[in-house]
Image (tube, rainbow, N blue to C red):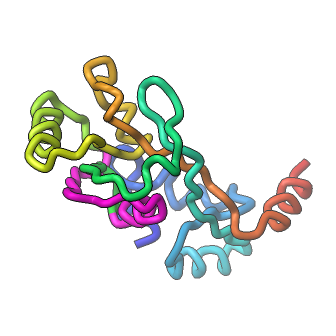
Amino acid sequence: KPVGNGFLLPAGPLREPISGRRRAHVIFARSNYKVLEKIAQKEKIPILEFDYIVEGVCNKQGPVSLPDLEGKDVIAFCGIANPESFQSTLAELKVNILEFKTFQDHHQYTANDIELLCNCSQRFAPKIIITTEKDWVKLPIEELDDSWLFVRVRLKPKEDDFLVSRFEMLI
């Protein structure tokens, strides 16, 4: 569902109402954007497809070596609209997911949630608990040790030249 439930943040995935398309010069889409194609054709707006690229993994001290994570047992969790995309990212990192906990999109983490994750960690005995950067910023970071990690991603357009040409048109 490229426009999800049609609601704006924090209730939905949209950053702006669909009516804002009239001001748009480009529509950014990650995948399966058939609904957006109809809008784009009607409004004569190009669609720029992008992927998420892992930029790094960090704990509260800073960056962690990616090769050091390969093959490690982890407890993973996230509160994002498409948790499967985070699982795919973790597969790219070649970690061994012992438990994958999902929370609702835009979840505000509580002490009970932290306790639940710590209990999972004790039950399975991995040395790593990993999440998304989006979820990391909602955690009580000062209470976490260095075994808690987050994955930092960035957007990468599938067609770099297209993006540059669109920006040049606007300048």
Q: Position of residue 90 (x, y in %)?
A: 41, 59
Q: Residue furthest top?
A: 142
Q: Residue at x 19, y 57 (%)?
A: 99
Please tell me which residue is depicted at 71% across the width and 62% down the height of the picture: 26
Left or right, 35 with respect to 95, comes to right
| Residue drawn at x 69%, y 58% as measured from the top left | 24
Q: Nearer the viewer, residue 125 or 90?
A: 125
Q: Is residue 77 magenta?
A: no
Where does the magenta region start and end?
A: 84-106
Whether residue 104 is situated above or below residue 42 in the rendered picture: above
Viewport quadrant of the N terminus: bottom left
Q: Is residue 95 above or below residue 151?
A: below
Asked which quadrant contains residue 95, the reply is bottom left
Q: Is residue 87 inside the magenta stretch?
A: yes
x and y percentages locating residue 64 in the rendered image: 50, 37
In the image: residue 93, left or right of residue 149: right
| Left or right relative to 31: residue 109 | left
Judging depth in this view, the residue of 103 and 60 nearest the camera is: 60
Percent coordinates x, y for residue 25 in the rendering: 74, 60
Residue 145, compared with residue 55, is above or below; it is above
